[in-house]
Image (spheres, rainbow, N blue to C red):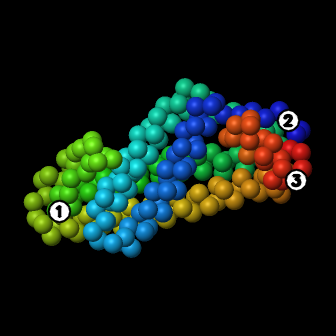
Amino acid sequence: MSEAVKRYHAGAMILHWLMALLILGNLALGLLLEDIPIEQRFQFYQLHKSIGITVLVLTVLRIIWRLMYRAPALPGHIKPWEKAVANLTYVLFYLLMVAIPFSGWMMVSSSPKNIPTFLYGILPLPHLPFFDAIQDIEARKELSHSIEEVHLWLAYGLLTLLALHVGAALRHHWILKDEIILRMTPRWMEGVLQKLRGKSI
């Protein structure tokens, strides 16, 4: 390495990888919900909503953590345009990680079916009160469907952003052969990454 690796705080790493697993799993679950047998679909919808709210809470915690602990500075060899793209990516990630679960919550709250949500089958999640004034059933259906469309397109946007993010990390590690990927990985992973690349970092 030409520069010492400046890693994120351990707490930020834990949040990052935990949220990555939850988000990827929930995106896959959300896209497969309609293919699940109808007699099992309710419990998987409940799980999807539970994970979404968990991601929303963890995103708020991550934002608070980011305000408390500054991110390590990017290495000096990173070009200004790359830094700008990285910063824009972070902002978009945070926006989507809030907007997607919140839009799902809005969709459930606006539905005229009035289906209750129990987080992990235990904790009841109240519906958002914004839609109580809408009494017309057809209007509620149309609004809920519109929010569902937004929810879906936001999810596709997040999938696209994730693909770009992973692609950029792999480019830095295998093509540019720099230490960027190590910033968000624990020290014990360094040897594994070295072996995968087949060359000392």
Task: State which quarter of the image contains the C terminus.
Answer: top right
* Residue 39 image-quadrant placement: bottom left
Left of 169 or right of it: where is 143? left
Return the x and y of residue 158 as percentages of the image width and height.
52, 58
Look at mark 1 in the image and give the residue it sits on.
113
Residue 189 visible to an observer of this rendering: yes
Look at mark 2 in the image and give the residue it sits on.
3
Q: Secondary structure at mark 1?
A: loop
Q: CA distance from mark 1 to mark 2?
A: 58 Å
Q: Secondary structure at mark 2?
A: loop
Which amino acid type corresponds to the residue marked 1 in the rendered image?
Lys
Image height of 160 relative to 73, above or below:
below
Q: Secondary structure at mark 3?
A: loop
* Residue 17 image-quadrant placement: top right
* Residue 134 image-quadrant placement: bottom left
Q: CA distance from mark 2 to mark 3?
A: 20 Å
Number of marks: 3
Q: CA distance from mark 3 to mark 1?
A: 56 Å
What residue is rendered at 54% in x and 43% in y?
Answer: 18
What residue is rendered at 38% in x and 63% in y?
Answer: 150
What residue is rendered at 78% in x and 41% in y?
Answer: 190
Return the x and y of residue 124 as percentages of the image width and height.
24, 44
N-term mark: 1 or 2: 2
